[in-house]
Image (cartoon, grey):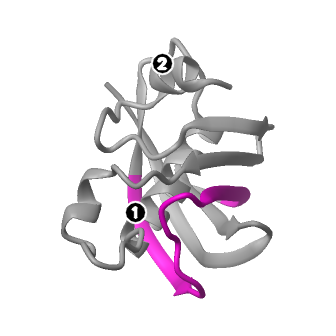
Amino acid sequence: MNIDEILSILPHRFPFILVDRVLEKSENHIVAVKNVTANEIFFLGHFPRYPIYPGVLIIEGLAQAAGLMLLDPGKNFIPLFLGIDKARFKAEVRPGDVLKYEVKLKETRMGVYFVEGKATVDGKVVATATLMLGVKKQ
């Protein structure tokens, strides 16, 4: 799935679209990537002399990947981020890194989707979290 297909599903736009490409997708699993570049706007303040990709954006990227897993193009639905549990940050993400998001659907209860997310760079785990998502008709 390329960026045009991603933008047909997610409501996010620059500077807040945090998935560049989807490598694999099924109804309960997705693998997507974000190319972290030195000219990302938030690096102006986080941190100018030693830029680190913000952890909260790694979690948001996992949530966006989950939204891509749950939704289909052409439908009039948006993903809603409902909660985060067990978020852990294990390593820095720096400009030039390719951030890989892996998300698996674990459970669905009363319209709430529970997913396990893992973010890696070069095979090294940089963050993990359990996320809760919903879907709303636009």
User: Measured from the top left, where is residue 98 in percent x and y?
Assistant: 63, 55
Residue 57 badge: 1
Q: Name the outermost residue toward the front.
A: 49
User: Measured from the top left, where is residue 92 in percent x and y?
Assistant: 52, 80
Residue stretch in magenta? 81-107
Q: Is residue 19 above or below residue 62?
A: above
Q: Residues within 10 Å of mark 1 (few under 14, many from 20)?
A: few
Quarter of the figure with the C terminus:
top left
User: Taking 2 as reference, is 132 left or right?
Assistant: left
Residue 128 location, quadrant = bottom right
Which element carries disc 2, helix, strand or loop?
A: helix
Magenta stretch: helix, strand or loop mostly: strand
Residue 8 badge: 2
Q: Is residue 57 above or below residue 72?
A: below
Q: Amino acid at mark 2?
A: Ser
Q: Is residue 64 above or below residue 99?
A: above
Q: Amino acid at mark 1?
A: Leu
Q: Is residue 83 magenta?
A: yes
| Residue nearest the viewer, comparing 85 with 102 | 102
Q: Residues within 10 Å of mark 2 (few under 14, many from 20)?
A: some
Q: Is residue 124 magenta?
A: no
| Residue ID at (28%, 41%) | 15
Quarter of the figure with the N terminus:
top right
